[in-house]
Image (tube, grey):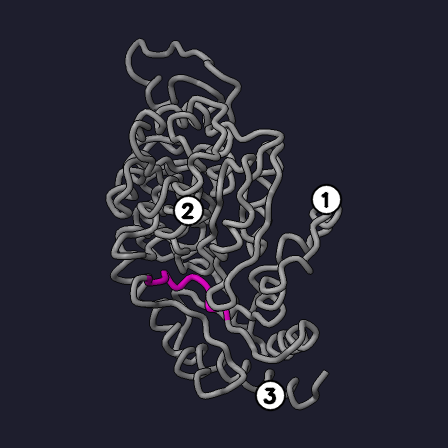
Amino acid sequence: MIPFSPPHIDQKIIDEVNKALLSGWITTGPRTKLFEKELTKYCGNKATLCLNSATAGLEIILRWFGVKEGDEVILPAYTYSATANVIIHCGATPVFVDVNATDFNIAIDQIEKAITPKTKVIMPVDFGGYPCDYETINALVLKYKNTFIAETNEQKMLGRILILSDSAHSIGASYNGKKTGALTDVSVFSFHAVKNLSTAEGGAIALNLPEPLNNENIYQELCIKTLHGQNKDALAKTQKGNWRYDIVEAGYKCNMTDIAAAIGLVELERYDNDTLKNRKHIFELYDTAFSRYDWAQLPIHKSKNKISCYHLYALRIKRITEIQRDAIIKEIFDKDVSVNVHFIPVPMMSYYKGLGYNIKNYPVTFDNYSREISLPVYYDLTEEQIKSVIDAVIQSVEKVLIIKI
């Protein structure tokens, strides 16, 4: 069976993890702090905080910005549930909007229609590793600056809607020559096991806020907020006589460990010159194979000002129904190839349907979802396995299209 997305664990990673284990420091410590610095250098943003997940990063930023009951946060209907769940956790209202028919990303005209005086945050999602149109989104929040109602010090200092990018898929992608992390106010990465750059579990907040906000000060504030509101971390308390600490707020527990950071440091070092080249090669082989068929709608992964990080190969099959798509997936699995669907849109989930959301209000989202099949893309996928994936997809699509379910 060809798996969908197993992690790439080699001897170099094992050796670095062993070093961390034997160092006597396995929780947040020197490796985590180094990883943060290296990520900031790589992305070109102003400060970076590593955490135990991207989900934690999204929620912490919403809470830092003062998002609460009565506020609205705009996000695409086409995303994973985490993007919406963190809004619910804060007591705010998710305002879903539709996406582009071309690249799965949030539709700018739909964002503009959804902005109200209650809007505090816009959360674009870089689907599959392909960046959203940040130049336009950044300009859009300035356009509505005069209608923004600031209620906290942070909101008053920014003076407009915050852009919080769900960049879970897109580390290493670029837009107008800049890498994700440096494209808007705040971006949050995921380092989950299936992501391009993995720490097993983990995430990072890339701060890139404009003046008068001070990103380094905010970093320090978030360090406290993500460690129980404690004003010193464990590393600081190891200094002679520095044991005393205070709890300055009722914070959270979502720090990254040095074990995870050890994996991340290896992954980041070889990311551009190895991982991304490998993933791009797989995308190109799929493109070459499927471009011969008129039923194949290939994913966009490059344009004149954008380059994907090749996270998901989201193939769409033209002129089929959701039922036909599901039948194609079954046929592919029967040929010992694992595929996936990214994503079942959030308004289709039971909890959100119970809140009154209806997928019929997001027709492009549903159309994209109903025809999408994510193909395996991972470091150790061989040329022979890629051929098997291609053959399985072609045979399965043509079988189902002939049957015309």
Residue to which mark 3 is pinned? 398
Q: Position of residue 88 (x, y in %)?
A: 62, 37
Q: How dense is the environment of label 1, judged by Cα within 10 Å: few (below 14), some, or many (20 and up)?
A: few
Q: Earlier in the sequence, mark 2 or mark 1?
A: 2
Q: Quadrant of the C terminus?
A: bottom right
**CA distance separating discs 2 and 1:** 28 Å
**CA distance separating discs 1 and 3:** 39 Å
Task: Tell me, yes or no, if residue 22 can be seen here.
Answer: no
Q: Position of residue 324 (x, y in %)?
A: 67, 77
Which callout, 3 or 2, points to the residue nearer the camera? 2
Which callout, 1 or 3, points to the residue nearer the camera? 1
**Residue 61 versus residue 170 in the image, above or below:** above
Say which residue appears at 46% left-offset and 68% top-offset: 313
In the rendered structure, find residue 140 and report the number of the disc placed on it.
2
Asked whether 57 falls inside the magenta stretch, the response is no
Q: Earlier in the sequence, mark 3 or mark 2?
A: 2
* Proximity of marks 2 and 1: CB atoms separated by less than 8 Å: no
* Proximity of marks 1 and 3: CB atoms separated by less than 8 Å: no
Q: Position of residue 3 (x, y in %)?
A: 52, 67
Task: Tell me, yes or no, if residue 100 can be seen here.
Answer: yes
Report the span colored magenta: 306-314
Say which residue appears at 28% left-offset and 62% top-offset: 274
Helix, strand or loop at label 2? It is: helix
